[in-house]
Amino acid sequence: MITLGIDIGGTGVKGAPVDTDKGVLLEERYRVLTPQPATPGAIAECVAEIVEHFSWTERIGCGVPAVVKGGIVMTAANIDHAWIGCDAKSLLEKRTGCKVNLINDADAAGLAEMRYGAGQGHYGVVLMITLGTGIGTALFTNGELLPNTELGHIEIRGKDAEKRASEAAKIRKDLSWEEWADRLNEYFSHIEALLWPDLIIIGGGASKHYERFAPLLTVNAQITRARLLNEAGIVGAALAGLHHPEPPDKKS
Ligand code: BGC
């Protein structure tokens, strides 16, 4: 099957047709800079540009950095607040003329890693963590996703965890790798106390520098780097375009 996967991010909106049997991009990804403010209407234009670039008319899967339920965006930690309550599925379907499924961006990356990457064959409790502008999480057991876990927002030292330990926090506070690893260890120890994952897959922008900080981590779980790197979001979104279940009242 071939589906168009689109990953909506804070700096870029990227997409490519994906062979969902093999988990590979069939053409070079097309990237549009995320407009500011990144309102739903402005992002819909970026999605339409990608759709037009590939002359796409079939199904689309779209990853968004927010909780999404039945096509409605529920949260907006790192995106424009106008997204909250937005029926993004209808908006994008109307603008593109294609059938669209939406999924949380970390869930998309996790689906891709479980199927084609670092999570292949792992049937225990697997937690994919994306370290980037925010902290995204995707939780799997027996290979099944529990959607919309927002474990980047647990409270640590009275603060939202992603504000202390995301890649953006490292850059903003000019933390050394050691200082950042201390914060990550504190974050992971809270997560481990709650969930006891067997495997933690680290993805997101920071996974490019995995060698710099992974040796400093002291987690109990097995830990590994995401394999699909910056393609995971697109590949996983495409998978969601095919498989993400919708509530019965939303089925057409
Ligand atoms: C959002 C998540 C998202 C993550 C990574 C967080 O701020 O709440 O929904 O998955 O950032 O983009």
Image (spheres, helix red, strand yellow):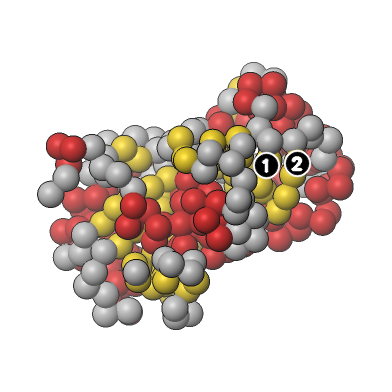
Q: Earlier in the sequence, mark 1 or mark 2?
A: 1
Residue found 23% across the figure and 37% down from its top: 247
* Residue 21 screen position, x and y as percent: 43, 67
The N terminus sits in image quarter = bottom left
Residue 39 horizontal side relative to residue 121, left or right: left
* Residue 88 screen position, x and y as percent: 26, 48
Structural distance between the alpha carbons of marks 1 and 2: 6 Å
Residue found 26% across the figure and 75% down from its top: 56
| As drawn, 191 above or below 70 | above
Residue found 27% across the figure and 68% down from its top: 48
Determine whether the residue tagged by mark 2 lies in a helix, strand or loop.
Answer: strand
Residue 161 horizontal side relative to residue 25, left or right: right
Displayed quadrant of residue 206: bottom right
Q: Pointer 1: what residue?
A: 200
Q: Pointer 2: what residue?
A: 222
Identify the amino acid type marked 2. Answer: Gln
Determine whether the residue tagged by mark 1 lies in a helix, strand or loop.
Answer: strand
Displayed quadrant of residue 183: top right
| As drawn, 219 above or below 39 | above
Q: Are marks 1 and 2 in contact (CB under 8 Å)?
A: yes
Any part of residue 33 in sight: no
Residue found 62% across the figure and 46% down from its top: 122
* Residue 246 screen position, x and y as percent: 26, 42
